[in-house]
């Protein structure tokens, strides 16, 4: 797909959009100050954030609008306690490096999961952030209400509904990359650039309303071959045929096409922006691939409030993904996910709310890479919320059933009694308490369980990318865990300025944690082998000399870990005016102690630092801060992100993987020396300045990575140098 095709597609969608915009749109200048922050993801209902018994952060639309953010992953990375790595999100150290498969954090768009059918991953750039009212980040196990994938937390976005006054917004930005700190990394003669154009419109007339947005994006890429082009159109149709908003029908839609160059690992530490194979996808050592992808989801839903004010809500989604690998057709895949969720909420007396329902997920994968597979996931859930004076109590249970390719073992739960009762479903529980100690002071405690089922990619991938082999593991079992925390929220209010200080102590524990581990693999038996104490069959294989080392060493998803992560989470956010200055902030610090409880010496032998049991691809300290101050027409803002040194990675990325003394094979040449030289944490600073005129137009100058720091989120993945952005916004 050529670049001009994407531009033509976007132009067409924009013309369709502008044909619907009224000639004149009134501007809503009335603002109502509200001291409360309302969230919905924690209990599938509206409630004050102070009453939520688990840690939670809310990202305001201003943060996304003003920072030049182009996808949801970048936005989430601004959140305290959250770290993003190569498209995967980790909350409080719950996830490491998973090679783009599986997720312990569940993404919700309008209350429904949005994970792909084949890899269980999230395509962050497919989310229409321009339509979201806010981004809610819930920390801790949340499988009771939302099922598999919410083992580590939830990222929830809800679409803002159209108001009586039509709204139109346009945003354009153009960015250019500066030169990297090390001259050897620079490969371009002309600096790479990136552009994005975003248009949004909403309107409501009588009983009918709609939203529509179009986005076009192109990035030359700061790494060789990592060019990206995409276009998207999305929106929702709303119909409220009955008085008093008792019935609401909606139909959401989202379609995106994109062409991307996917960079995996570097050529060497001195050529970190150059992929293995120098960008030649025909070379056997190349880790660069080009993909053309399409994503479409359709969301019909209905909400009805009966005469007793009970709420009935049915949400459905058809999610289709097609990914064509242009470099290797044998790695192409497609999947269709069908989702249904029914929730019934009724009042119990004057103080209680019972939320019950069921969900069903059907998944069909057609792939040359994974093979063809089907899975079904059924669940029933119920959660009771009771409010009595200053006390809030929450308790819930979910019964989860999952099968893949008609194998039911994934959901079996054994009750350890004399006769060992086996249930065909897996139960998970949740409970929480909130107590308002005094005005603006809130105490809380919570405990929740979670479960995550293996994705098709984790079980069945068998491929190679450059020097990386990936082996299948059809017997992979689900991972389970629990999360507990106690915390305190302290609110502050000065005039219209409000702030919230949140302190929590947490413990997360996991069993059968799925993780890609480096192994020696017998291609004859198709089983991992033990090079220290090999079986007779493995010994025969090792001594035969019929196979090259590149054929039988690589990675496989395994139930590798029993792990515990404990720590402390502190956050502070504020919004409003101090005098004539509007001040918005979001900042926090998280201390984590992620340790492996795995007693298998073969497992810990794969750690790069065997003197510690610290989990791979984690760190102990994470700090975030974003502050923006506005006075009259001007605003200034900065953000800072810091993480301590990633002490443990896969040892194989640093060492020679060929056990023979006559040759050497390095997956990431130069990584060990690079990590020894850069054995400190990463600090990244961003800066922005903006001028607003006529209350409708905003001109911004943004500098990301202001100090031009060289840093990596994972091995072989050096991030972008300094980036300069000019942004123009208009709202009508």
Image (cartoon, rainbow, N blue to C red):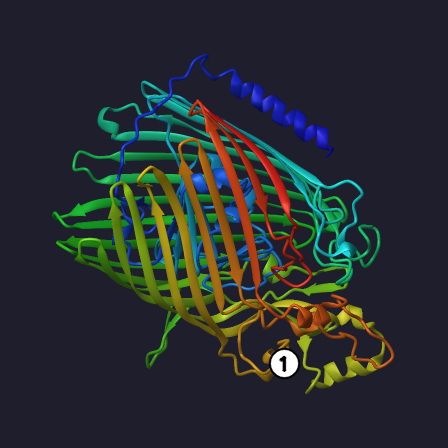
Whether residue 237 is visible, yes or no, is yes
Closer to us: 47 or 186 = 186
- Mark 1 closeness class: few <14, some 14–19, many ≥20 residues within 10 Å: few
Residue matched to label 1: 605
Closer to us: 226 or 417 = 226
Q: Does 730 sit above or below residue 658?
A: above
Q: Secondary structure at mark 1?
A: loop
Q: Tell me the residue at 22%/27% (across/down).
A: 244
Closer to us: 237 or 53 = 53
Closer to us: 212 or 174 = 174
Q: Tell me the residue at 67%/58% (across/down).
A: 717
Q: Quadrant of residue 462?
A: bottom right
> Residue 656 in the image: x percent, y percent?
76, 75
* Left or right position of 570 against 364: left
Whether residue 217 is visible, yes or no, is no
Q: Quadrant of residue 671?
A: bottom right
Q: Tell me the residue at 75%/66% (across/down).
A: 667
Quadrant in which the C terminus is drawn: top left
* Left or right position of 466 against 42: right
How many marks can you see? 1
Q: Does 509 sit above or below residue 68?
A: below
Q: Tell me the residue at 48%/35% (across/down).
A: 130
> Residue 697 in the image: x percent, y percent?
48, 26
Q: Does 401 sit above or below residue 25?
A: below
């Amino acid at each position: 797909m050529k670049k001009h095709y994407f531009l033509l597609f976007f132009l067409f969608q924009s013309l369709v959009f502008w044909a619907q915009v009224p000639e004149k749109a009134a501007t809503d200048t009335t603002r109502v100050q509200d001291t409360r922050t309302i969230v919905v993801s924690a209990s599938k209902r509206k409630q004050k954030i102070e009453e939520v018994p688990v840690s939670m952060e809310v990202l305001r639309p201003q943060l996304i609008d003003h920072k030049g953010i182009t996808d949801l992953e970048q936005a989430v990375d601004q959140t305290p306690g959250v770290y993003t790595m190569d498209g995967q999100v980790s909350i409080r150290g719950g996830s490491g490096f998973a090679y783009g498969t599986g997720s312990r954090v569940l993404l919700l768009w309008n209350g429904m999961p949005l994970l792909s059918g084949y890899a269980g991953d999230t395509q962050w750039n497919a989310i229409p952030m321009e339509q979201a009212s806010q981004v809610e980040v819930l920390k801790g196990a949340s499988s009771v209400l939302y099922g598999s994938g919410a083992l580590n937390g939830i990222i929830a976005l809800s679409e803002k509904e159209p108001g009586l006054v039509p709204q139109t917004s346009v945003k354009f930005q153009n960015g250019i990359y500066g030169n990297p700190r090390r001259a050897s990394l620079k490969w371009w003669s002309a600096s790479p650039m990136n552009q994005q154009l975003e248009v949004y419109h909403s309107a409501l007339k009588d009983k009918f309303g709609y939203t529509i947005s179009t986005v076009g994006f192109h990035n030359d890429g700061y790494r060789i071959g990592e060019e990206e082009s995409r276009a998207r159109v999305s929106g929702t149709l709303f119909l409220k045929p009955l008085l008093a908003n008792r019935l609401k029908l909606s139909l959401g839609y989202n379609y995106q096409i994109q062409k991307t160059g996917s960079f995996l690992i570097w050529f060497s530490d001195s050529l970190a922006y150059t992929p293995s194979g120098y960008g030649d996808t025909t070379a056997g050592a190349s880790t660069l691939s080009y993909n053309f992808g399409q994503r479409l989801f359709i969301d019909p839903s209905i909400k009805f409030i009966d005469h007793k004010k009970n709420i009935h809500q049915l949400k459905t989604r058809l999610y289709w993904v097609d990914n064509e690998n242009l470099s290797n057709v044998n790695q192409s895949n497609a999947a269709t996910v069908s989702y249904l969720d029914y929730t019934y909420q009724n009042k119990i007396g004057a103080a209680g709310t019972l939320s019950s329902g069921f969900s069903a997920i059907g998944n069909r994968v057609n792939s040359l890479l994974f093979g063809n597979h089907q899975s079904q996931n059924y669940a029933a859930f119920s959660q009771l919320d009771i409010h009595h004076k200053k006390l809030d109590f929450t308790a819930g249970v979910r019964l989860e059933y999952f099968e893949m390719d008609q194998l039911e073992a994934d959901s079996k739960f054994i009750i350890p009694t004399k006769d060992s009762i086996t249930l065909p479903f897996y139960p998970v529980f949740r409970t929480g308490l909130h107590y308002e100690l005094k005005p603006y002071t809130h105490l809380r405690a919570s405990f929740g369980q979670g479960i995550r089922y293996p994705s098709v990619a984790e079980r069945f991938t068998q491929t190679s990318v450059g020097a990386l082999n990936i082996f299948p593991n059809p017997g992979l079992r689900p991972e389970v865990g629990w999360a507990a925390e106690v915390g305190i929220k302290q609110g502050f209010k000065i005039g219209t300025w409000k702030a919230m200080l949140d302190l929590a102590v947490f413990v997360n524990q996991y069993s059968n944690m799925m993780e890609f581990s480096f192994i020696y693999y017998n291609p004859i038996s198709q089983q991992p082998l033990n090079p220290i104490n090999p079986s007779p069959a493995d010994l025969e294989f090792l001594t035969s000399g019929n196979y090259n080392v590149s054929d039988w060493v690589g990675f496989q998803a395994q139930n590798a870990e029993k792990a515990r992560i404990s720590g402390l989470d502190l956050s502070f956010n504020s919004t409003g005016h101090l005098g004539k200055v509007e001040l918005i902030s979001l900042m926090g610090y998280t201390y984590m102690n992620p340790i492996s409880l795995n007693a298998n010496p073969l497992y810990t032998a794969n750690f790069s630092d065997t003197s510690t049991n610290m989990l791979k691809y984690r760190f102990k300290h994470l700090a975030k801060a974003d502050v923006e101050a506005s006075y009259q027409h001007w605003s200034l803002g900065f953000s800072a992100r810091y993480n301590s040194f990633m002490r443990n990675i896969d040892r194989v990325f640093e060492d020679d993987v060929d056990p023979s003394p006559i040759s050497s094979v390095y997956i990431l040449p130069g990584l060990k020396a690079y990590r020894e030289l850069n054995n400190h944490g990463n600090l990244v600073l961003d800066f922005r300045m903006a001028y607003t005129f006529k209350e409708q137009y905003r001109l911004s100058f943004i500098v990301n990575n202001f100090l031009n720091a060289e840093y990596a989120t994972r091995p072989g993945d050096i991030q972008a140098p300094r980036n300069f952005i000019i942004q123009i916004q208009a709202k009508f």
